[in-house]
C-alpha cells in the first residue's frame, strides 16, 4: 500500500508540473507583449508568476475563460491534492476544502491517478484548441 501511495503522489506531482509548464508556455507571448507595453519594474519570467496571474494573461490575450476549458474543475481538484502534500503533509486545507473534520487527509488510489491523467489530457487539448494559431 505504501508503494501505491508513493506512486500516486508522484503521478499527481508530475501532472501538476506538466500543467504548469503548459500554462507557462501558452502565456509566454502574452507575458512579453505586456512587458513590452508597460516596461516597468524588474523583469520576471513567466515561470515566476503565480498560476492565477498566468490564467489572467491567457484569458486576456486569447479572449477566453480558463474556467470554461474542458475538465477545469477536475484539474483544480487534483491541484488541491498536490498542494495538500506539498504544504500540509497530505492534510486538506480545513477552510478551503470544506472538511468534515479538522484533520482530514487526502486519500489517493491508482484509479484516481489514472482519472487525473485523463482529466489533464482533456484540459490541455481543449486549451490548445483555443490558443493555437490565435493572435500571433
Image (cartoon, grey):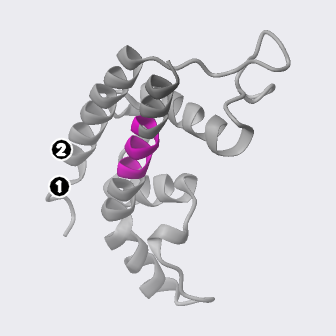
> Circles 2 and 1: CB distance less than 8 Å?
yes
Q: Which residue is drawn at 44% across and 39% down?
A: 10
Whether residue 13 is in magenta: the answer is yes
Q: Which residue is drawn at 43% across and 87% down?
A: 36
The magenta region covers: 11-19
114 relative to 126, above or below? above
The residue beneath circle 1 is 132
Quadrant where the C terminus sits is: bottom left
Indicate the position of residue 65 as horizontal and vertical percent values: 41, 41
Whether residue 68 is in magenta: the answer is no
Q: Distance between the residues labelled 2 and 1?
A: 6 Å
Circle 1 Cα neighbour tier, 10 Å, few/some/many (<14 / 14–19 / ≥20) = few
Where on the picture, by quarter, is residue 94?
top right
Circle 2 Cα neighbour tier, 10 Å, few/some/many (<14 / 14–19 / ≥20) = few
Direction right: furthest residue: 102
Q: Residue at x 42, y 72 (%)?
A: 31
Q: Which residue is drawn at 75% across and 18% down?
A: 104
The answer, for residue 73, to whether it is visible in the render is no
Q: Is mark 2 on a helix, strand or loop?
A: helix
Q: Tell whether 53 sits left or right of 46.
A: right
35 relative to 14, above or below? below
The label shown at residue 63 is: none
The residue beneath circle 2 is 129
19 relative to 76, above or below? below
Indicate the position of residue 82 as horizontal and vertical percent values: 55, 38
SS assignment for the magenta stretch, majority: helix
| Residue nearest the observer in this picture, 1 or 67 | 1
Q: Tell whether 80 sits left or right of 133.
A: right
Direction left: furthest residue: 133
Amino acid at each position: 500500500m505504501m508503494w501505491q501511495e508513493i506512486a500516486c503522489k508522484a503521478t499527481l506531482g508530475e501532472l501538476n508540473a506538466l500543467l504548469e509548464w503548459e500554462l507557462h508556455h501558452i502565456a509566454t507571448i502574452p507575458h512579453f507583449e505586456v512587458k513590452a507595453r508597460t516596461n516597468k519594474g524588474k523583469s520576471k519570467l513567466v515561470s515566476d508568476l503565480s498560476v492565477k496571474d498566468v490564467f489572467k494573461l491567457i484569458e486576456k490575450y486569447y479572449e477566453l475563460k480558463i474556467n470554461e476549458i474542458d475538465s477545469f474543475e477536475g484539474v483544480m481538484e487534483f491541484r488541491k491534492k498536490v498542494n495538500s502534500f506539498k504544504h500540509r503533509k497530505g492534510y486538506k486545507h480545513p477552510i478551503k476544502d470544506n472538511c468534515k473534520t479538522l484533520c482530514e487527509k487526502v486519500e489517493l488510489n491508482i484509479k484516481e491517478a489514472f482519472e487525473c491523467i485523463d482529466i489533464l489530457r482533456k484540459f490541455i487539448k481543449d486549451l490548445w484548441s483555443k490558443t493555437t494559431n490565435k493572435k500571433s
